Image (spheres, rainbow, N blue to C red):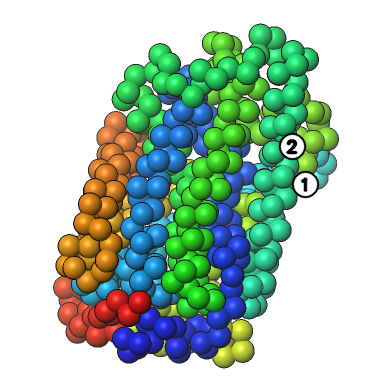
Amino acid sequence: MSETTLASGEGTASGGKRKLRIWEVTALSVGFMGPVMAMALNGIGVAGLVGKSVPFTFVLAFIGTLLVGYGFIRLTGYFTHAGSVYALAGATIGPRAGFFGGFALLGTYLFFSACILGATGVFFGAWAEQFGGALRAVPWILVALVVSVLVVILNIRESHVVTRVLFVIGSLGVLAMLVLAAVIFWRVGTGTGPVEGATIDWSTFLPGDASGTAVLTASVFAFLSWAGFESGASLGEETENPRRVIPRALLGAIVVAGVLYTVMMFAQTVGYGTGEEGVAAFAGANSTLTSLSTTYIGREYALLIAFIAFVVAFASVLSSTAAAARLIYALARDGFGPKRLGVANPRTGVPTAAVFTTVVLAVLLAGGIAAFGGTAFDAYYWYATIATLCMVVAYGMTSVGVIVYVFRGRTNIPKWEAILPVLGLLYLAFVYSVQVIGQEAPYTYFPWIAGAWCLIGLAIILVMPKLAQRIGGRLSVEDLG
């Protein structure tokens, strides 16, 4: 790939035909994050650590995500590539760093895909339990297999089909959550709510009695709600005017999610009540959206929310596998892996072989948990932890990349802005430490698994130096903007 090709997008996965618009790219990133899943599960652990200060903690995590996202937002304004971190770190730090970061991100996407396959089993089970009947006996791995088949069917179609499906599903999920939030605010605000003593308590946006350590630790769990915000960058070669659209889409995904998360966490906190009993109920919930729907609206709405959560989990699998397939395609196209994986369908622009490979690997990972008697919750939490550890490494490479790019003087980015990715790196280091220090088995094993994955990437660089040299020739891109 020549210098002009990478910058302009000629010879890309879409055959040089730019198709996707800003809302479609944003839909992929938001779809990967799975807002309904995040809001149903991620506030529970936060409440257990900081009490009623859950909204404050999510605002803090929002700021941390913006700092981490800075590198992606800045660099995608200069570089266009299906490889995301692979290309961004490779073009700024060097080919070896690019391959290492890309390999770490590939681990993130694959483990997240398997994790969300587990989540489809979790939410299908929750819906079936509410609905009743024979559906409660359906094994979670069978649900994951059916979801995988549907994901392949959609992902081998043109990219705009996938992004529009994600947009529709995401919009329905957001609408359902906002309706619940509106009912909670109205009933609590008018004193007609079912929870005695619940009020619109604005002090939830302050740290309150929670210690600084507890707030920072809790912010890590909140930060995971934004995991995958950068996935839209993988569509850089299939997007119209990518240097303008991709950065705005990534920033839009972070901000939209941040506002939504803050509103929903405020609604959930006041919905349960900010007293000791309310905080305990929040921290002890299995799915906050389902339980609050039952309490404030009724069982029928809880059924709807549970089903929507399942559909959003499906959308997240669709998004994560789409992003992983683009990264596998980019690596194979540049010389790593079978050549077949580096070929896109000339009609649709989709890397079909890479899509099949991604989904098969995700199913094998999920199936490994099921084969040894693991539950859908095990698949979700175990693979989410491994994916997060790989993700921190990948995000860190991009933050380092933008710092290097700024100080090499190849851009008009003001040097003072380097403080933003430096703060982002500090936050990522804290995220990593929280995932490692003080954990109990089996979580003590996961840093070793994530580390082994990243070390495999490092070993490939050392054993195959010519591969890195080839990649370097294709990623040596000057700013043509």
Q: CA distance from mark 1 to mark 2?
A: 28 Å
Which one is in front, 238 or 439? 238
- Residue at left offset 44%, top offset 71%: 243
167 left or right of 204 in image: right
Q: Earlier in the sequence, mark 1 or mark 2?
A: 1
Look at the picture and state if 160 lies above or below 395: below
In this view of the protein, can residue 61 be seen by the observer?
yes
Can you tell which quarter of the image residue 154 is in? bottom right
- Which one is closest to the eye, mark 1 or mark 2? 2
285 left or right of 91 in image: right
Which one is in front, 364 or 116? 116
Give residue 306's position: percent from left, percent from top.
Answer: 71, 41
Query: Dot 2 surroundings within 10 Å: few (below 14), some, or many (20 or more)?
Result: few
- Using the image, tell me which numbered label, if any, was put on residue 135: 1
302 left or right of 216 in image: right
Disc 1, disc 2: CB below 8 Å?
no
Can you tell which quarter of the image residue 350 is in? bottom right
Q: Give the residue number, with chain letter if any, for mark 2.
A: 179
The amino acid sitting under disc 2 is: Val
In this view of the protein, can residue 107 be seen by the observer?
no
